[in-house]
Image: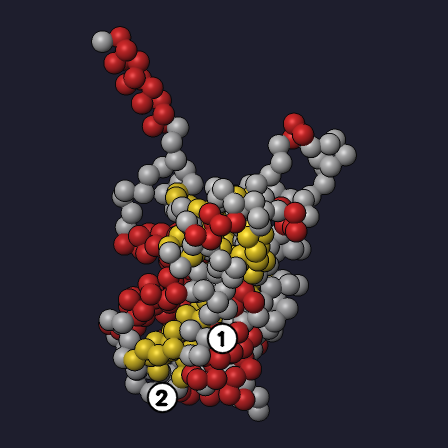
Amino acid sequence: MHNACRLLSLFVLTAAFAWPQNDTLDSVERLLKELTEAHGPSGYEDPVRRIMRREFTPLADDIQTDGLGSLIARLDGSSETRVMMAAHMDEVGMLVRRIRPDGYLTFQTVGGWLGQALINQRYIIMTRNGPVRGITGLKTPHVTPQSERPHLHDRDRIFIDVGARDQRDAEERLGIRPGDPIAPDSPFMKLNDPKLYVGKAWDDRIGLAVEIEVLKRLRRLPPPNTVFAVATAQEEVGLRGAQTSSNIVKPDIGISIEVGVAADYPFITQDQAQERLGGGPGIFLHDSSMIPNVKFRDFVADLADSEDIPLQFEVLSGYGEDGAMMQRAHGGAPSINITVPTRYLHNHNGVLHRDDFDRAVDLVEHIIRHLDPATVEQLKSFD
């Protein structure tokens, strides 16, 4: 009896300190969980595309893909004015460069990683036989010379341990081969707050979820235009899917839906980024790939104010997003970038706030419903 009580006490204590469980998720949270946990580095977006096709199918009048695998869903409204909203499916990842004779993997990064974000983390290698788990190894401090300890590890000296005995074992038993994509292994959870969501690849799975929720609303009451909801491929390696899909859609106006760079944590300054969690969606005024159309910028800001939607403004010196390709398409189209503020981008764990997501859905829906043909022509005019 005494032992049974001790075991029960140990179970209760362990449960108290366990990560929160996700057994009471609402429908949006279940969608976000599925999207963020899907593995899809640039060029290997199949798992994400399957989710998006499933979600788009009952909402769209037509679905097609471009030659890179971007998914284009068309919703017919009351005019032929073409409104394109885009969010990208891919995430930063890696691919297998080679399998060493001892069975460890070396890799090539895909997308913008900081070297220190790669070390001692969990990964999924997407092989032809299914997912294989791996970790990036890190030498123990017990045998690391004092002179090496303060220095960051060179990326070329980081390796992945998949538990293989040797190269043959990795190839034959695990089915790994050069070129296999590698994605972070990070489950969805709530960060001690029902509205703070943790996950990988919010960049840009959160934008995909915004598209889905907006299409659901537009389907119930068609808009004054034709909407193209595009899930683009290979954004993280040069906005490639946005270029090819924009060539197909030929938008009159473009709305990129992305993650914003939150600046509400230590050691980041307001001159580096300006958004914060819980402050509402953001609108980019500048990034290294695009300067938004001024009329469209003011149109969105005024609309947000009239609809009582909080709006944050972001000016970045870096960054790149699909709006840059929509802006250049078909002779030029007014384009903007709407964001959901997110902490810790291009890492294994990002954090965002549910209220910002909900307000972003509200804002994008209102934008599209106000883009009648006359308004679009006025936004495109430089007379």
Q: Residue at x 69, y 43 (%)?
A: 152
- x and y, in percent, of residue 255 in the image: 46, 73
Q: Which mark is residue 242?
A: 1
**In the image, farthest residue toward the top:** 2
| Cα separation between marks 2 and 1 | 21 Å
The quadrant of the rendering that contains the N terminus is: top left
Earlier sequence position, callout 2 versus callout 1:
2
| Outermost residue, bottom side | 383
Q: Is residue 220 left or right of residue 308?
A: left
- Residue 142 appearing in the image: yes
Q: Picture coordinates of residue 217 (x, y %)?
A: 29, 68
In percent of width and height, residue 280 lies at 46, 57
Rendered view: 196 above or below 290: above
Q: Nearer the viewer, mark 2 or mark 1?
A: 1
Between 255 and 124, the one lying in front of the other is: 124
Judged from the image, the secondary structure of the residue bearing numbered disc 1 is helix
Q: Amino acid at mark 2?
A: Glu
Residue tagged by mark 2? 80
x, y (%) of residue 252? 46, 85
Q: Observer-nearest residue: 217 or 304? A: 217
Q: Residues within 10 Å of mark 1 (few under 14, many from 20)?
A: many
Q: Residue furthest front?
A: 168
- Residue at image coords 72%, 41%: 151
Residue type highlighted by circle 1: Ala
